[in-house]
Amino acid sequence: MKIFPATEENIRNAVELIRKGKLIAFPTETVYGLGANGLDPIAAASIFAAKARPSFNPLILHVTGAEMMAQICSQIPESVLKLMSRFSPGPLTYVLPKSETVPDIVTSGNPTVGVRIPAHPVALRLIELAGVPVAAPSANKFNKLSPTDAKHVAKQLHGEVDMILDGGMTTIGVESTIVTERMGKIVILRHGGVPKEEIEEFLGYRVSETTDSARPDSPGQLKYHYAPAIRIAFRDETDFDRINFSRAAALRFGKTGESDDKDFRLVRNLSVTGDLREASSNLFRYLHELENEDIEIIVADKIEPAGLGKAIMDRLTKAVNYYRRPADLK
Ligand code: TXA
Ligand code: MG
């Protein structure tokens, strides 16, 4: 097995591997990342190959702080510095003009680079010891569920990684929110661990989102993504007369009627009390559990898209859309 507890010694071993251009998986507070030396174009190429990720989908570089960030960005706008003072380290990624040091493969040829200061002690220690920005997309195969546990990484990438550092379950459970600056204003490119409302309250103005999925600014805006291996559909779009309940699971949210789900083989509730933090930390975990079961459909509740509910609904909608795609695209 390649899973090792994230002790100081094992973090050092992981850093040795990073220096040799290898791939290692490590915990962050959002999801596990598939990490490599972010300044080494060959190591970055290995990430794309391991994930079977299209080369047009750029990687995020993870840094320990503003100093390392300045090495990879040609400019950090005022508004971003302001956001950093409140939300970094944490689940917020900034898309900024890149400097010459960043290989083009990392940014998929874009003049910008995605940068994040993670809040997880293991991630920070790893980057600190490596002494270079660590490129890390979520440690899953392209279009599959993101990992919130070391076991999830092993399930999809066992053959592709050299080491998985185990830091237990991630606390936030959905990926970082991604922002950029346009004409002096912050714009959201992907919903995630920092709710839009918190950013708006802090900045004192309404923040816009780019929604043009035909020409995504962040490929995180692709219409389908994050799909479990089992078909998933929304409850209010499902014809219950056509369900084989003995092979179906319900994914619920909040208080539900006691007899509502008695026919389903399996029932999971993201948060019985309707707590969105609890729900986001359970989302990928439950989907991973359910895709391991012998069932044919997951029937999911819709969640009101406010606060963290936006990030959760975004992931669920993309998973549902994956199974709505014309068959020839699958
Ligand atoms: O929470 C997270 O952000 C996790 C952990 C590991 O840090 N990482 C993560 O990476 O979610 P990934 O690669 O799965 O998603 C990163 C998203 C992608 O949709 C990518 O297209 C977008 O960030 N991105 C990266 N660089 C970008 C850039 N220069 N311009 C626009 N979008 C960018
Ligand atoms: Mg991802």
Image (cartoon, rainbow, N blue to C red):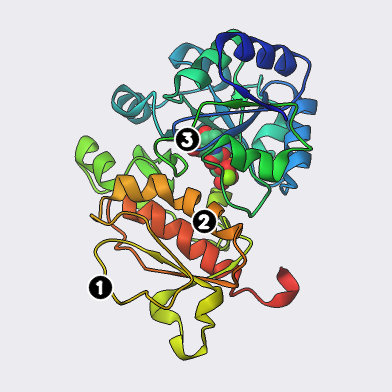
Indicate the position of residue 245 as horizontal and vertical percent values: 50, 79
Q: Is residue 11 above or below residue 99?
A: above
Indicate the position of residue 281 as horizontal and vertical percent values: 40, 44
Query: Is residue 252 among the parts visible in the rendering?
Result: yes
Disc nearer the start of the sequence (2/3): 3
Point 73% across, 35% down: residue: 47
| Kind of element beneath mark 1 | loop
Point 47% across, 35% down: residue: 169
Image label count: 3
Out of 264 and 34, give the one closest to the viewer: 264
Q: Which residue is mark 3?
A: 169
Q: Which residue is mark 1?
A: 257
Out of 182 and 286, give the one closest to the viewer: 286
The answer to whether residue 320 is left or right of residue 13 is left
Disc nearer the start of the sequence (1/3): 3
Indicate the position of residue 65 as horizontal and vertical percent values: 45, 16
3D distance between C-alphas at marks 2 and 3: 14 Å
Image quadrant for the N terminus? top right
- Quarter of the view holding residue 254: bottom left
| Kind of element beneath mark 3 | loop
